[in-house]
């Protein structure tokens, strides 16, 4: 047990030297290893935070762009609906105008037809009057040229009418 006791015994001078060596090693490591390592880690942390911030800003920008796109799509849809409504209204107005023009033209055609029929009827009436006058004159001439016998007058008129029918 003598030896094992010596292994476990503490020599204050060695312990002091070990503590001093540890402190010196710690200070050296802190100055030349931990500080640069902490600086690198802090820079990396800043880069990560900046990347996260940039990602957040990009997500916000994407959200803003998406909202703007939705707004523009809504406006485009509304503009399309407005144009369709206007086109339908214009079509209906054009249809109404065409129908109205067609009615007016039909009315004018009917009016001209009535006028034409009236003119032709008047001309026919004038023609008929002329023919009646001519017939009356011819009949009167025949009656005057023949003796004043009623039977002969009738016979002359019938002959005259028979000749007229043959001419037609």
Image (cartoon, rainbow, N blue to C red):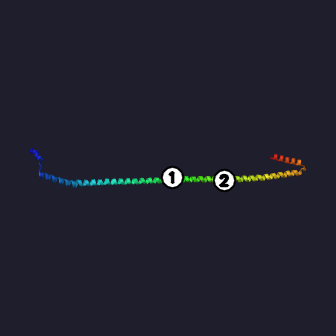
Along the horizontal axis of the image, is 63 left or right of 29?
A: right
What's the residue at 32%, 54% (across, down)? 49
- Residue 111 is tagged as none
Q: Residue 166 placed where, x, y %?
A: 82, 45
Give the SS element for disc 2: helix
Helix, strand or loop at mark 1:
helix
Would you name the residue on which mark 2 appears? 107
Q: How many marks?
A: 2
Residue 3 location (% of width, % of height) = 10, 45
Question: Label 1, on which residue?
Answer: 81
The disc, 1 or 2, on the residue closer to the chain's N-terminal end is 1
- Circles 1 and 2: CB distance less than 8 Å? no
Q: In the image, what residue occupies the spot 83% across and 52% down?
A: 136
**Left or right for 30, reference 168:** left
Left or right side of 26 for 69: right
Residue located at (85% from left, 50% from top): 139
Q: Is residue 17 left or right of residue 162?
A: left
Give neighbour class at mark 1: few <14, some 14-19, many 20+ (Cα, 10 Å).
few
Q: Quadrant of residue 27?
A: bottom left
Whole-number angstrom distance, CA of label 1 to CA of label 2? 38 Å
């Amino acid at each position: 047990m003598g030896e094992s006791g010596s292994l476990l015994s503490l020599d204050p001078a060695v312990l002091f030297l070990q503590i001093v060596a540890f402190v010196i090693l710690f200070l050296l490591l802190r100055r030349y290893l931990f500080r640069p390592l902490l600086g690198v880690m802090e820079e990396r942390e800043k880069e990560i935070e900046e990347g996260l911030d940039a990602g957040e800003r990009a997500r916000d920008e994407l959200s803003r762009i998406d909202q703007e796109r939705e707004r523009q799509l809504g406006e485009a849809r509304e503009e399309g609906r407005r144009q369709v409504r206007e086109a339908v209204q214009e079509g209906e107005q054009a249809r109404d105008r065409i129908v109205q023009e067609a009615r007016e033209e039909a009315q004018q055609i009917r009016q001209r037809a009535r006028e034409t029929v009236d003119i032709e009827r008047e001309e026919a009436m004038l023609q008929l009057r002329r023919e009646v006058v001519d017939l009356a004159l011819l009949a009167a001439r025949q009656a005057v040229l023949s003796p004043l016998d009623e039977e002969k007058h009738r016979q002359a008129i019938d002959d005259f009418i028979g000749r007229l029918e043959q001419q037609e």
